[in-house]
Image (cartoon, helix red, strand yellow):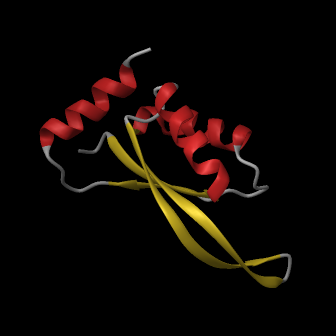
Amino acid sequence: MKDIRIVYITIPRDAARKMALELVQERLAACVNIVPMVTSFYWWEDAVQTDDESLLIVKTTVQKFDALMQYVLENHEYELPEIIGLPISSAYPDYVNWVKAETSKS
């Protein structure tokens, strides 16, 4: 379980499908879910901003996290994208093995 990360990435709605597909194709993620509509409120440039975005829920490994983050930083249109990796405390072992296997292929 310690080898797996769930990663949250907010992204403009029109870019979500492309980013999700690329992360899987590059084997940086075994699976990406898209929550198609989230509304975000946040501070930026000394003012409260709001945006309609999508949320990517990415399943990857600890070993792939840095490469995934670098890929997102290079391909995301935001100056400061949200990339949050969360450890998991429990999961179905066969699913964990699948995530590891899919992200280890080239």
Outermost residue on the top side: it is 106
Q: Where is residue 31, by image quadrant?
A: top left
The answer to whether 99 is drawn above or below residue 50 in the figure is above
Q: How many marks?
A: 0
Residue 35, image x and y in percent? 46, 61
Q: Where is residue 87, by image quadrant?
A: bottom left
Identified at 38% across, 47% down, the residue is 5
Residue 66, image x and y in percent? 55, 37
Residue 54, image x and y in percent? 56, 61
Q: Is residue 51 left or right of residue 99?
A: right
Which residue is nearer to you in this view: 66 or 95?
A: 95
Residue 56, image x and y in percent? 50, 54
Q: Is residue 90 left or right of residue 48?
A: left
Quarter occupied by the C terminus: top left
Q: Is residue 68 left or right of residue 101?
A: right
Quarter occupied by the N terminus: top left
Identified at 38% across, 17% down, the residue is 105
Outermost residue on the left side: it is 93
Which residue is nearer to you in this view: 43 or 41?
A: 41
Q: Where is residue 79, by image quadrant?
A: bottom right
Identified at 68% across, 56% down, the residue is 81
Identified at 52% across, 42% down, the residue is 20
The answer to whether 24 is drawn above or below residue 46 in the figure is above
